[in-house]
Image (spheres, rainbow, N blue to C red):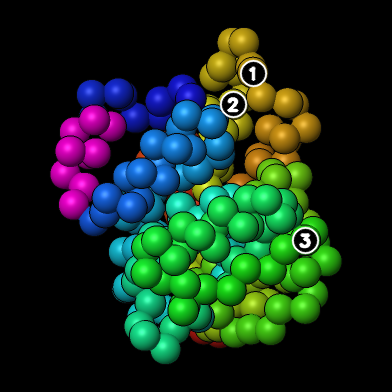
Amino acid sequence: MAYIVPAPVERYLASLNRAGSPVLEAIAASGKERDLPLIDAEVGALLRVVALTARAKRILEIGTAIGYSGIWLAGALPPDGMLITLELSEERAREARENFTRAGVADRTTILVGDATLKIAKVSGPFDLIFLDTDKQLYVKLLDRLVGLLRPGGVLVADNVLWDGEVVPGYITEPKRPAEDTKAVQTFNERVAAHPELITTIVPLRDGVSVSVKSAQR
């Protein structure tokens, strides 16, 4: 990954993160060994801060992977809270369930396995927080549905919105990402920035995180 923030600054920020746990560290290490598309601990801490600030009781995640980001989110929930997370792969979903158990959050998590574009139609809102971290081609396709599932004042967070800097025309001289994915992320950024129901900012942390709040008035 190309660093949006200089590497020494990233390492400094990582050294200050006290919100993790041995279970999270072990899952992150396993994911790194297998080159899985996991968020890193600094983005995880941001998710937990946002969830706590929103006083989230119901969270929706698109893209479970092996449960790493879900543990960061579920760890902010009260005992009666619930994280619903969608994952395409049954194999990854099984591993995520095991990791949720290891982390002690299995009672606050439900995994739905299948195509997110189909499963999302069966999910009922409202949600206090939605985290989007899946196939970038789906970001725009899912956007309006996700906004509809948010409560007024709810927060939509999306990962990888700077896409190794490739969303900036001409910034990367030798792009490595598929052009169609880069275009999809660019379109998503433009849509959330202009969406009439959202107030959005992009945090240049790791690969870029957009944070959007749904307006209380339509």
Q: Secondary structure at mark 2?
A: loop
Left or right: where 178 falls relative to 36 = right
Could you tell me residue 59's position as x and y percent?
51, 74
List the residue tagged with mark 1: 176
Residue 122's x, y, as percent?
Answer: 77, 78
CA–CA distance in space, label 1 to label 2: 8 Å
Q: Earlier in the sequence, mark 2 or mark 3?
A: 3
Instruction: Tell me the magenta residue range.
Output: 10-18
Labels 1 and 2: the sequence-earlier one: 2
Q: Is residue 17 magenta?
A: yes
Relative image position of residue 123 (x, y in whole percent)? 71, 78
Kindly indicate whether the residue at mark 2 contacts the one at mark 1 (C-beta within 8 angstroms).
yes
* Label of residue 38 in the image: none
Toward the right, the furthest residue is: 118
Residue at image mark 2? 166
Q: Secondary structure at mark 3?
A: loop
Q: Residues within 10 Å of mark 1 (few under 14, many from 20)?
A: few
Answer whether residue 87 is visible to the viewer in this image: yes
